[in-house]
Amino acid sequence: MNPSRTRSTRQRHARPRNAAPKRKPLIAPQKDFALPVSTTPALPPVERFADLDMPEQLLSTLTAQGVTVPFPIQGSTLPNSLAGRDVLGRGRTGSGKTLAFGLALLARTAGRRAESRRPLALVLVPTRELAEQVGTALAPYARSLRLRTATVVGGMGISRQAGALRDGVELVVATPGRLKDLIERRDCSLGDVRITVLDEADQMADMGFLPQVTALLKQVPDDGQRMLFSATLDRDVDRLVRMFLNDPVVHSVDAPAGTVTEMEHHIVHVASADKMSTAARIAARDGRVLMFRDTKRSVDRLTKDLLRSGVRAAALHGGKSQPQRNRALEHFKNGHVTVLVATNVAARGIHIDDLDLVVNVDPPTDHKDYLHRGGRTARAGASGSVLTLVLPEERRELNRLVAAVGVTAKTVTAASRDADLTRIAGAQEPSGVPVIVAEPVPARAPGTGGGRSGGSRTRAPRHQPDAHSDAEADHG
């Protein structure tokens, strides 16, 4: 081998010392697998909850909650799930999946009493936030039937959660990692579970939970009812379907892209030196905005910069404790802060009313991430926009991703003070007066170690130390 040729080759391919780190390559979308065809005819859908064979307490609670007409996924799957059939449902977040499986689960569990450490029904979800949301959504219906529930997730006291299971609960909503821990401690057994639900199954597969989920499902009796709901159905979910669902009723609300194709999509070409000032002016708009960044460290850095510039902002990522994450979400939902800066931990399953703008400060590298980030806006028929800031070196990959998703985006080149940003996103200059966020004192909720917000106290915002990993890990 010629040494001089080797050296010149190395020099030619060497990256500049100060070059920016390479972003991960785009992950090509996987095609949905062929949906299984049920050998048993499905029961026809209903147009009214009153037409369903459900306990009167559930019908009364639906009326009290202002839920009068079933969403399509509810009207289609509930007649079959109430009859005990396995269900495979595809629908975007916000399509009504929680009540689609929750009402059937509670109705079929009503009147039974769980023994200590042996729940009767199980809902598995990928993230802590989704577990809290599902538990909260089902709580009034469970109370009406005098069914006990527990939410078990990582980032909160395991002893308190173990105590709730020892006291006996009929329904457990859990993330896979924490449930595995409780089983290993012998604080929980799945031997009496008759109904199992996997919610956001594709995200559980994407986050690496598939081995844990498979191991947990193998502990559930084979003759129980299984329901699997997912926004997308690809090869990993296909494996779960074939392993654990028996002749399921299949219902698909919409294509994987869902209503993301109906939103306004904007690609804003920015220079590297102007990117953060552009993000700050968008964040200072009148109205709330959800901003996504790639890493925990970049989330914390942008949040601090926004607070210093006069924008009420909060950070959400897997490096925060669960009480911190709960507070950030609650502050954003009630308007205490107007900007939530997050990693992909906020891209799935989190419902925020009247959110009309999502900003990808860092473009997603996966078509699913684009779909689910955008899915936080334009919910329940409302309008919404998705805006992505793109550096020159990111343009080609972002164009391919948008084409793969199947949306048409309007493209502009803008500096931070351009009128286009004001027209598209309501951008304006931040006040420049640093913000100190008042944090509520959390009250502990029985059996969970978390709680609702209580009174408030004022103190400087607290931040976790910068994370060193670029990967978002939330192992629940």
Image: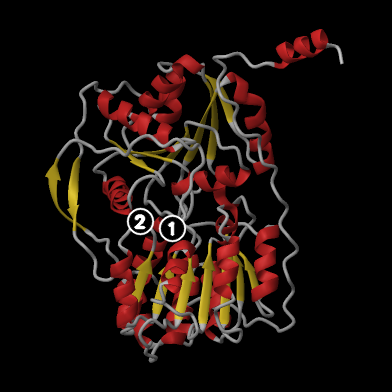
x then y, percent, for residue 433:
20, 23
Disc 2 marks which residue? 155
Question: Mark 2 near mark 1, Cβ–Cβ under 8 Å?
Answer: yes
Residue 197: percent from left, percent from top:
52, 72
Identify the element where label 1 is drawn.
loop
Res 115 quadrant in image: bottom left
Left or right, 286 with reference to 43: left
Q: Does residue 55 appear left or right of residue 21 in this picture?
A: left
The image quadrant where one finds the N terminus is top right
Residue at x-position 68% and y-position 73%: 243
Where in the figure is residue 384, as x and y percent of width and height?
46, 42
Q: Quadrant of the C terminus?
A: bottom left
Mark seen at residue 211: none
Q: Nearer the viewer, residue 271 or 422?
A: 271
Is 283 placed above or below 15 here?
below
**Amino acid under label 2?**
Gly
Residue corresponding to mark 1: 476
Vertical order, 84 against 300 (above or below): below
Q: Of the residues under marks 2 and 1, which one precedes in the sequence? A: 2
Q: Is residue 415 visible?
A: no
For the point 66% across and 30% down, the residue is 397
Q: Secondary structure at mark 2?
A: loop
- Quick one: which residue is furthest to the bottom in this view? 111
Q: Is residue 457 visible?
A: yes
**Which of these two is toward me, 34 or 50?**
34
Q: Nearer the viewer, residue 438 or 167?
A: 167
User: Which amino acid type is marked by label 1?
Assistant: Gly
